[in-house]
Structures are given as C-alpha cells and as structure tokens.
Amino acid sequence: MSISISLVFYLLLISISTKPIQDDYATLSMLSKYGFIEFLIVHWQTHGGNIWPLALHSLAVYSALNSFSFITLTIFGICTALIIVLTVVIFANNFMILERTDKKPMVLFLIFGTLLGFEGMFTPGIVGAFQFSSASLVHLWPVLFFVIGISLSQLSTKRKSLLFVIGFASGNSNITESAAFLLTILIIMWIYKIRFNTIKRKNMFSLFIGILLGTVLILSSKGFWTRANSGAHNGLPDSFMSFVIDLLRSLLYFSADVLSHTMVYVFFLAGIIYAHKVKEIFSSQNFLPYLEVLTISLFMFLVLGASFAYPSWHQSLGLLFLLPCFFLRLGSWFALGIKRFSIRTTSMLLFFMLGVLLVSLIRPPVLTLNRSTEWEISNNTNICLIKEGKLNALTNPELRYPPLNLGVEEVQSWEWILNAYQYWIENNAASNNIKC
C-alpha cells in the first residue's frame, strides 16, 4: 500500500509541475489565431490527418489559451497514468492466469514497470509520457488503445462497434504505429487462426478495419504529403547505399534507446529468477503473443520510419510501454532455455538495477519542479521583452539529460518554437496583467 501511495504522489508531483513543452506553444498560437474548428482544417491542409490527437491536444492546453494556468495539462498527465493502469489491468484479466494470491503483486509489478519504465539514463521519458502531451498522444496513447482493443477482442461477446472506435483511434495517430498494429493483427491471425472462433474473428476484423480507416484518413490529408515533401524530412534516399546508412543509423539510435532504460534490465532479470512462474502466468488458453509481436513490429517500423525522416527520443514512448512485459517474457525464455545460471548472482544484479532505477527516478521530479519555477520567472521576463521588441533575448528553461543533451527544447533553440511562443504571449489576455 505504501508503495502504491508513493507512486501516486510521485506521478501527481510530475503532473502538477507541467509547463508548456515545444508543440504546446504551436497549438496555443494556432488556437489563438484560428479557433478550434479552423485550426483542425489548417492542420489537415498543412500537417496531416491525425485529427483526434490534435483535438485532444487542444483540450490539453485549453486552460492556457488566455491565462497562465496549466490545469488541463496537469489533468492530461493524470489521465495518461490512469489509462496506463487501465490497459495493464485489462490485459492481465484477459491474457494471464493469476491465482488470487499472485494477482495483486503481479499486476502491481507490471503497473510499476509500465508507469516508470519510460525513464531512460539519457532521455527524460517520464517527462515525455506525462508532460509532453503532443508526443504522448501521437506515440503512447495509440499503443494503449491498441492493447485494450486486442484484449477486448478475445472476449466471447460481440463488441464490434466499440472495437471499431478503438481501432480508429489507434490508427489515426501516426503511420509508424498504425503499420505496426496492422502487421501484428495479420501475423497473429495467420499463425493462430485456429484459435479464433466466429465472434473473436468478427471482433478482430472490426478492430482491423478501424485501424485501417484511421490510417487512410492520415494518408488522404493534403498536409501529410506536404510535410513528406518538405525539407523537414529526408524523403526518399538518393541511393541504396544512403538508405542503408540511414537505416543503420536509425537502428543504432533506437537500439541504444531501448538498452539505456533501466526498467528493461529489471524485468529481464525478474523473468530469469521467476521463469517457471512467468511461464505459468502466460499459459492462459486465451493467451496469444500480441505484445511480443507488437514490440518487434513497432521497433522495426520505428527504425524504418526514422530512416526516411529523423529519429527522436520521444518517438519510442509507445515502445517503452511494451518493453517491461516483453523483457519479462524474454528473461523467462532465456532461463528456461539456458538452464545454467546462478540465482544468487541474478538476484544481486536485480537489486543493483533496482537501486540504479530508484536513483534515476529522483531526477524527473527535481528537474520538472525546478523548470516549473524557473519557467514562471522567465515567462514574466519574456512578456516584458516581447513588449519591448527584444525577441533575441527570449529564453525559457530547457530540460536536457547529459551527455547527449536530449530532452525538452525551448524558444532559444528553435525559431518555430520562438515564433509560436511569441504569438501566444501577444494574444494571451493574461500578459496584460504583467507589469514591466
């Protein structure tokens, strides 16, 4: 109970300290300029057809449209945590065999891993999941919806309408995630087709069609092709060799990203120690290796997609949610296959990695609280600088992790962030209350 209370307090602290991050400024400035409906139309024409993430992002920043209150961003972080918990519970109830004495500890262990596993040694993953709302909506939320969808599709009751909606929400987010979802369903349905009765087949078909239509909506937008052909993306490679180089660079980036997350090692080692228990838990008659196939598919498409554009730390948020369960299973397979390992040594390694993890988890709340305080000060200063026309002097606190300097960037780093921030401030009624 004390661990659960500590986890709730920890995530509340992160959510309460949220201040605008990168794309938040762009959405706030566009909402100030166009209003909600016209903003969606402009987005369709200039950026893409992933409409529902944009609509929710508009709601997430809404309280800051004419004030400097960020309560809706705080609510977003809380909702993200609740949806993660809901996803884990639904998945566990449908795919895992858990005795009454084992159910609570195992589900809590998975919730602990999926909520805190975002944090990397070199990337602020917890900030990405719970504060970077635009990235979370595009890369994390669709994965959560898809996992809920595949869990509900295994029930012996018709849920076609609900699964279609869930599928559409999953597919209308980002092409990379959509492709991984579609491939996962095709692989599972092909290999395990004998396991699907008529009702389950219809449920899965509804989910698949929803994802497909959501993806088609993205591809049919003018903005998708405008961005694809813009200078912001690499586009098609000049030669086969340049494609291979970009692909290998992307593979190295995301491989290093996965391996720099401590939770991966915690769950892998736990899988080794409790191999037989893990095997027993995942021996449900309903169980199908959706998460394993999805994890590999999503990793593959992240690598491929980034080779045509650019790799970034926040693109893997959905993948990071899947890794704890994947590496728990991987550790159990390793232990059952090798059968030569020291429980004592493995346990010592597990406690060591838990210690590293706990130390690393101190960083996010400290840095976010510090950024929140500094942002309020710098924002007041920036309002006066904007009124005086001194745009080159604008700065806001960034949140970057050494040594790669990856993380949250601000107005001093990108011109598009500066322009969006300036427009929002100039059209925010609360700016008039600041005395210079």
Image (cartoon, rainbow, N blue to C red):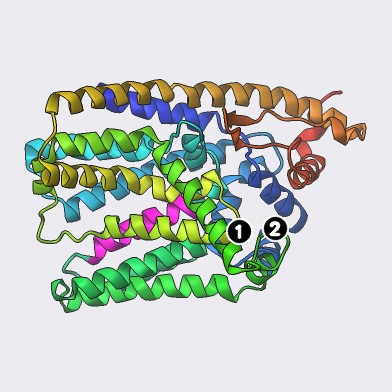
**Mark 2 touching mark 1, by CB under 8 A?**
yes
Residue type pointed to by label 2: Ala
Name the residue: 72% across, 30% down.
Answer: 396
Magenta stretch, main secondary structure, is helix
Relative vertical location of residue 185 with respect to residue 431 in this rendering, above or below? below
Distance in Å between CA atoms under marks 2 and 1: 8 Å
Label 1 sits on residue? 309
Quadrant position of the C terminus in the picture: top right
Q: Residues within 10 Å of mark 1 (few under 14, many from 20)?
A: some
Quadrant position of the N terminus in the picture: top left
Residue pushed farthest right?
Answer: 388
Relative vertical location of residue 12 with respect to residue 333 in this rendering, above or below? above
Can you see residue 169? no
Q: Nearer the viewer, residue 189 or 138?
A: 189
Can you see residue 351? yes
Place of residue 222 in the rendered image (x, y in percent of width and height, measured from the top left): 67, 73
Name the residue: 36% across, 38% down.
Answer: 115
Q: Nearer the viewer, residue 241 or 37?
A: 241
Label 2 sits on residue? 232
Place of residue 99 in the rendered image (x, y in percent of width and height, measured from the top left): 7, 42
Q: For the magenta stretch, what is the residue range?
A: 138-153
Place of residue 295 in the rendered image (x, y in percent of width and height, measured from the top left): 34, 55
Q: Which type of secondary structure does the marked residue at label 1 adopt?
A: loop
Place of residue 328 in the rendered image (x, y in percent of width and height, measured from the top left): 23, 42
Residue 147 lies in the magenta stretch? yes
Name the residue: 17% across, 34% down.
Answer: 105
Of callouts 2 and 1, which one flags the residue occurring earlier in the amino acid sequence? 2
